[in-house]
Image (cartoon, rainbow, N blue to C red):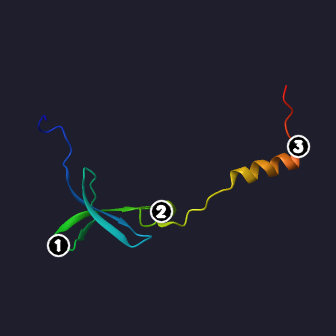
Amino acid sequence: MKSDIHPAYQPVVFRDRSAGYAFLTRSTATSDKTIEWEDGNTYPVIDVETSSASHPFYTGTARVLDTAGRVERFERRYGRREER
């Protein structure tokens, strides 16, 4: 790799405030805010809106829509389309 053209790749904490969940990983993202991690070191922290701890798909609270029922209800209401 060429020197001095790549962003710094460093440990960063991503924190999901809605779920109270945080994880340490490496990233090129930076932040002015810092947090003291479990290992006693201080790392930049980035607050995120959604993570695997709060997303409905991963938490099992996602709702499944009955698309077949919706099509049937539409056809009952407005009739079937005639084929040409």
**Position of residue 49 measured from the top left corner of the image (x, y, whole percent):** 44, 61
Q: Secondary structure at mark 2?
A: loop
34 sits to left or right of 57: left
Label 3 secondary element:
loop
Q: Quadrant of residue 61?
A: bottom right
Image coords of residue 22 (percent x, y):
32, 68
Image depth: mark 3 or mark 1 in front: 3
Residue 39: mark: 1
Given the image, on which type of amino acid does mark 1 rest?
Asp
The residue that label 2 is drawn on is 55
Whether residue 35 sits left or right of residue 2 in the image: it is: right
Q: Tell me where residue 43 sits by quadrant.
A: bottom left
Q: Are marks 3 and 1 in contact (CB under 8 Å)?
A: no
Residue 84 falls in image quadrant = top right
Q: Position of residue 8 (x, y in %)?
A: 18, 48
Residue 51 location in percent, x, y? 41, 61
Left or right of 2 in this view: 78: right
The one of 25 and 69 positioned closer to us in this rendering: 69
